[in-house]
Image (cartoon, grey):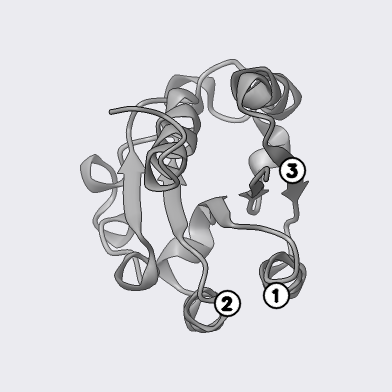
Amino acid sequence: MSKGMLILHGPNLNLLGTRQPEIYGSMTLEAINSALRQHVKPFEIALRVEQSNHEGVLIDRLHEARGWADGVVFNPGAYTHTSIALRDAIAAIALPVIEVHISNIHGREPFRHKSVLSGVCLGHIAGFGWHSYVLAVDALLRQWDILAG
């Protein structure tokens, strides 16, 4: 039986490739999504990719994931530091969620150092550029005993 995985991108990530490339790199969101699809192809994972700049839409996608997904890789962007609503949604869906950040949020401005979401996530990966997503996907695959490690 194949597993389902949601890759969920939060606000401003649609601007990757042009938005502050010195922090976020030059890879576009479409290129990241394509690389992730290729990465999971050998494992026959049902992969869905979503992006929204709107908190309510992100909550809706998390709620919908309960019906089909076995785990979520989530880059909540700036909502990481502010959204109790997203925290509550993650806690409510009872799925393993891995919080991902392209930049090292702990090495940036002090207001970015605290995540209100990490406490309800399976794990937190930050600072490895777009590869943070790959590391999170691999962590879920290991959690599911699909990838040896």
Q: Earlier in the sequence, mark 1 or mark 2?
A: 1
Q: What SS does tag 2 mark?
A: helix
Residue 113: percent from left, percent from top: 26, 56
- At 70% from the left and 75% from the top, the residue drawn is 63
Name above or below for residue 130 compared with residue 86. above
- At 43% from the left and 53% from the top, the residue drawn is 99
Is residue 18 visible to the viewer in this orientation of the structure?
A: no
Residue 120: mark: none
Q: Tag 2: Cα neighbours inside 10 Å, few (<14), some, or many (≥20)?
A: some
Residue 93: mark: 2
Residue 145: percent from left, percent from top: 40, 40
Q: Is residue 82 left or right of residue 8?
A: left
Q: Earlier in the sequence, mark 3 or mark 1?
A: 3
Q: Which residue is mark 3?
A: 49
**Amino acid under label 1?**
His
Q: What SS does tag 3 mark?
A: strand
Write down the quadrant of residue 41 in the picture: top right
Q: Is residue 146 left or right of residue 68?
A: left
Q: Quadrant of the N terminus?
A: top right
Residue 106: percent from left, percent from top: 23, 47
Query: Marks 2 and 3: CB-CB under 8 Å?
Result: no
- Along the line of sight, the residue nearer the viewer: 26 or 58: 58
**Amino acid under label 2?**
Ile
